[in-house]
Amino acid sequence: MSTHTQSYETTVAGGKHWSLTLSAGSLLRLVDLEGGANVGMLFYNPGNTLERYNAPDTLKCQHTFKLTAGHCLYSDMGRIFCSIVADSGGWHDTVCGNSTKRLVAGRWGEKSYQQYRNDWTQNGHDAFIVEGGKYGLGRRDLVANVNWFSKVAVADDGSLVFDPKHARSGAAVALRFEMDTLVLLHTCPHPLDRSAQYPRKPVAIRIGRAQPLAADDFCMNSRPENVRGFANNALYHLCGPAGTPESAS
Amino acid sequence: MKRASDLLPGEAVFRHVINAGDYWIDTLREGQRLRIVDVEGNQAADTLFFNAADVADRYSAVDTIREQGNVYLSCGTPLLSTSGNVLAEIVADTVGRHDTLGGACSSESNTVRYDLEKRTMHACRDSYLLAVGQHESLGLSKRDLTHNINFFMNVPVTPAGGLTFADGLSGPGEYVELRAAMNVIVLISNCPQLNNPCNAYNPTPLEVLIWDTDVL
């Protein structure tokens, strides 16, 4: 019996990383406090980290290139880690990957920890290496991630177009977790962000409990594929993997 | 961009037909050319590359498309690894555009895309798992089976952010050719998909050819 009623709120400064395990039924809300934020995120099943976020499945199952409200984030096992239950921005990227040490050094110059302490210029790839390492994950386990708040459109000829004005102050996205999920996150710059200075944009994070899933749920019913994705989750919960609350769905 | 190759099939050092539903895994030496032929047309060659000296350094779709600034692969595309190294380069292409967004089909994604009761139908990721399971000395496992290239598939992105599965641009005998920029392991699943109109519900053979020459 779950008795989570409290919520927790924190702010993660720009250029940082964090990780946490969210149980089924959790609600994670991210707010871009100043505009221009980017939150890199990866998802794993904490009971079997070989099950992980799969961007191609997520995109092709929902015939979308962008992520926004109504979309579900799929694992490679046909299950849904979380649903995007609210989104004020309308477009999040999941095909451009991470900034790297080389990219950050080339674009903004490398600021060492020795000299700059916690204002050093971290990069998204190494951030995931560090956070993943806490759970026994290594570089072989890193896959295409989500970049919340970042919009990268595609022109008719296939060219990628990063929109530097997309991420607005106060933009918010809310994720409802449909199964227990290990979340790795960083607030390092999007790899296509060409701001003059290393963008160091804070993000507010609020963790609470979601409303129970209703039969007319917007995400579940946004596409017939998602009805089947939720059915896969229901089967998973029926079989009762360790640590999954029975009330989850 | 389309460009034909001057290499002659009769001079290839290796030729192999991959039937639909089968895999092919082999190592290319730096400088070798690999041609993948869409023998009957509109067949998906779900392809992965690994640095043979360090398999954790593998093909990265996101790094490849971001660094070339374009979601479609064709002549001149360097295929980048997770560490930013060039694994191979597309040096000839008679189709003009290949997909690397759609990934490989799996039994599990088939349940979502098509029907829950299609979970036992054959899929690319099962072929990948069989390949790595039957070649344990390569040190590959499920962790290494990620976001691949779909040679010969056409998956246009709309300016509004939609993903469409369009009729193929490929046809019988069309091919793509790569030059290995280092020693690379190549893993191809010849897609067994029976639920998608992209191959007219009819998976067909692929042929791979390898040339030793780095001249021409």
Image: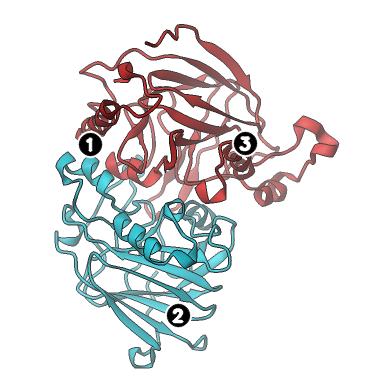
Chain colours: A red, B cyan
Going by the image, does A111 lie left or right of B51? right
Cα separation, mark 1 vs mark 3, equals 33 Å
Residue under numbered circle 1? A225
- Is A129 in front, or is B62? A129
- Between label 1 and label 3, give the one nearer the viewer: 1
Q: Amino acid at mark 3?
A: Cys
Q: Mark 1 — on which chain does it sit?
A: A
Q: Is residue B46 above or below residue B117?
A: below
> Does the rendering let one see residue A188?
yes
- Is B75 in front, or is B188? B188
Q: Amino acid at mark 1?
A: Glu
Q: Mark 3 — on which chain does it sit?
A: A
Q: Amino acid at mark 2?
A: Arg
Residue under numbered circle 3? A188
Image location of residue B85, percent across then percent down:
59, 63
Whether pointer 3 and pointer 2 mark residues with C-beta atoms closer than 8 Å, the reply is no
Image location of residue B171, percent across then percent down:
22, 71
Residue under numbered circle 2? B33
